[in-house]
Amino acid sequence: MADLQQASEQLGEGEVQATEEEQQQLEQYMGVALEVIHGEGPSGDQIAKMVLESQDVSMGIGNATSAVLISVEKQAGAMPDDIKIQLALEIIAELSGLAVEAGALAEDEIDDSFIDGVVSNAYSSYLSTKESMGELDPAELEQSVSEAEQITGTSVRGRGQQQPQQQQPQQQQSQQQSPMQGGLMSMAGG
């Protein structure tokens, strides 16, 4: 998992560190996301199926990331775009790590190209879902796409024209979580 951790620890050039308040918000949202991912019952099982039953693991992780992010938004309310993007990156890191633990993905498969594919799949899935829910404003969408491309250093329009610049995950949060029974690991027999 060293590749994922290295990729996740690289800060983008010129990136501004989150304020203490933003960091607290992110931790709160990530706590909700972890409950969705690891929760017993339908929520955790659906996320696990998205990842483990997808023929393309990057697509499965992308779709699962979108589902978790939308679930967090429903539970916690609207969140600023910069926090939403950071949260999505942390969800991707969490799901990728769990996919490795479950044997659905090899550690050496997690590289910049893989992460770029997951981000692109997550973003496409997020937009499609929001559009079907009637929650997509075209003007906001264009601004959001431009901001996301700037923050991540990735073009979601041309899929992978630039190298992604990952941000630091909340490893401490996931390490403090007690082992949970549902979700991805229960589907893998863990």
Image (cartoon, rainbow, N blue to C red):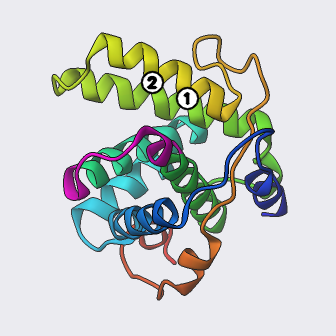
Measured from the top left, where is residue 31 in percent x and y? 40, 70
Q: In which quarter of the image is residue 114?
A: top right
Q: How many marks?
A: 2
Q: Which amino acid does label 2 sit on?
A: Ser
Q: Which of 60 and 77 is in front in this view?
A: 77
Q: What residue type is labelled 1?
A: Ala
- The residue under the point 34% across, 70% down is 35
The quarter of the rendered structure image containing the N terminus is bottom right
Q: Which residue lies furthest to the left in this view?
A: 134
Majority SS type along the magenta span: helix
Q: What element carries label 2?
A: helix
Q: Which mark is residue 144?
A: 2
Q: Is residue 53 left or right of residue 72?
A: right
Above or below, 183 relative to 113: below
Measured from the top left, where is residue 40 in percent x and y? 28, 74
Asked if the residue under mark 1 is in contact with the one under mark 2, i.e. CB atoms within 8 Å, the reply is yes
Q: In this view, does 58 lie to the left or right of 130?
A: right
Q: Which mark is residue 97?
A: none
Q: Give the range drawn in magenta.
A: 74-85
Which residue is labeled 1 in the image? 148
Q: Is residue 163 left or right of residue 101?
A: right
- The residue under the point 56% across, 60% down is 19
